[in-house]
Image (tube, grey):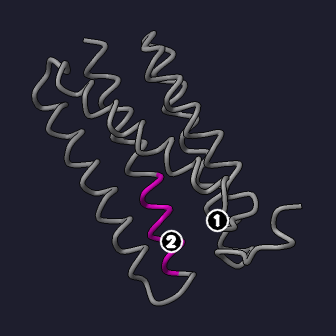
Amino acid sequence: MESSSKTRVLLPQYAARLFRSSFATCFSVLIAARYELWACAASALLVLLTSLNYWRDPVAGWRRSVDIAAVVVGIVYHVYCSAFCAPRAVQALYVLFLLQAAYCYRRAREAPTQDASSAWHCGVHVSGNVANMLLYTGLAV
């Protein structure tokens, strides 16, 4: 078992919080599929699966690296897609929520406690998925 030889990144109660908040990505997958944005749906599904796999037992290692890689590739792809979003207001909202997610990530990294850090990281999950759903709605127009 991987965690037996590696140190947990978070205490179980905070890891459980992030595991649960990762399920917010289900909404991104469903909205993308609803609008037949299959590449966006696949990207969101990959992030969902890698996130759940990591947060079920968060230790430094390959699962964390794969999760981070999936998120980075997903963000790059979604930012590329945002260039094709017809309604400029939706495009602006997408960018604002993406910036909010980045702000939450920064605060999570700088937080003094695991409780605060995991709460801020939940904000990453929520803000990022709101950004995705706004983008998908704009792309479907």
The image quadrant where one finds the N terminus is bottom right
Which residue does the numbered mark 2 point to in the structure image? 119
Task: Name the residue located 43 percent from the left edge and 23 percent from the top edge.
Answer: 40
Q: Residues within 10 Å of mark 1 (few under 14, many from 20)?
A: some
> Which of 72/101 is in front?
72
Does the magenta segment cover residue 42? Answer: no
Q: Could you tell me if the residues under marks 1 and 2 are in contact, i.e. CB atoms within 8 Å?
A: yes
Name the secondary structure under disc 1: helix
Report the magenta stretch's main SS.
Answer: helix
**Amino acid type, label 1:** Arg
Amino acid found under the numbered disc labelled 2: Ala
Q: Say few, some or many: other residues with alpha carbon within 10 Å of mark 2 (under 14 / 14 to 19 / 20 or more).
A: some
x, y (%) of residue 51?
A: 61, 49
Q: Residue at x 29, y 65 (%)?
A: 103
Residue named by callout 1: 17
Q: Nearer the viewer, residue 114 or 2?
A: 2
Write the residue at 30% across / 29% down. 135
**Which residue is painted at 45% across and 51% down in the image?**
126
Residue 85 lies in what quarter of the image?
Answer: top left
Q: Which sits in the foreground, 99 or 43?
A: 43
Vertically, is 35 above or below 92? above
Q: Measured from the top left, where is residue 97 in percent x and y? A: 27, 48
Q: For the residues marked 1 and 2, what is the alpha-carbon distance in whole angstroms?
A: 8 Å
How far across and down, in percent of the image, does residue 55 sit?
67, 58
Is 74 left or right of 54, judged from the image as shown? left
Q: Is residue 121 magenta?
A: yes
Q: Which residues are magenta?
A: 116-125
Estimate the x, y position of residue 6 in percent, counting from the top left. Answer: 76, 73
